[in-house]
Image (cartoon, rainbow, N blue to C red):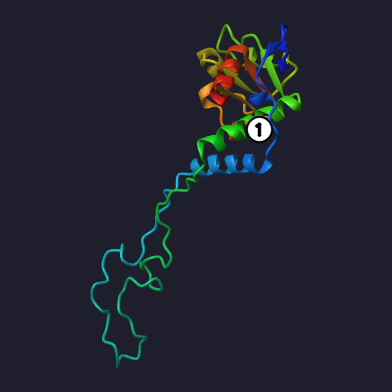
Amino acid sequence: MELQVQGGEAVSVSDTVFAADFNMPLVHQAVTAYMAGARAGTKAQKNRSAVSGGGAKPWRQKGTGRARAGTTRSPIWRSGGVAFAAQPRSYKQKLNKKMYRAALRSIISELVRLDRLRVVGEFKLHAPKTKGMVDALAALGLEDALVIVDSLDENIVLASRNLPFVDVVEVSGVNPYVLVRNKNIVITAEALRKLEEVLS
């Protein structure tokens, strides 16, 4: 198939990468796995064995009139341990590389079908100015977009970081979440070739 380059000639691309069937369950699994992998999982609380103290029985078992107690670090005591304490854990979900690449192909192909993928010859800014990024996207008829470049340029990165609905990544940074999150995708012709090579 062919993709039209803005202000240029059409480029021929692989049907395998840019005309794949849309697989919703696989895309959902890939996005969920990616977001789960981004979770820190560092929450931690102390259970009764981790709280200091509590070695001695507070009072004898019988004869005091008070409820029996074996430790001052019981969950029902002040300064006691947490009953079901949260512990550090990993939220990572396993996803095979073939499945991951298939999910990316599925998303990109659907973006092409919905006319949400714009191919440009190059995407450069002469100065790290937010207005320059806004004007560059406006020239393409866009206000928000994911810009995929073959190599990150400092001017583009600095010009886009103040825009909440504009993301800039290079080909190696393309992932299911960032593709689904953005309504429009702008990709340079060179980045398109690299992406096709990675996903073929």
Residue under the image location 51 percent in, 24 percent down: 172
Q: Residue at x 52, y 13 (%)?
A: 153
Residue 133 occupies which quadrant of the picture? top right
Q: Nearer the viewer, residue 158 or 11?
A: 11
Who is closer to the viewer here, 5 or 185?
5
**Where 143 sits versus 132, above or below?**
below
- Give the vertical position of 198 relative to 45 (above or below): above
The secondary structure type at the circle numbered 1 is helix
Q: Identify the residue at image location x=54%, y=35%.
A: 98
Residue under pointer 1: 106
Could you say which is closer to the camera, residue 77 or residue 140?
140
Residue 178, position as x, y percentages in the image: 60, 31
| Apparent side of residue 19 relative to residue 104 in the rendered image (left or right) | right
Residue lying at the far bottom in this picture: please name it.
63
* Residue for point 68% across, 30% down: 20
Task: Give the position of the C terminus as an image quadrant.
Answer: top right
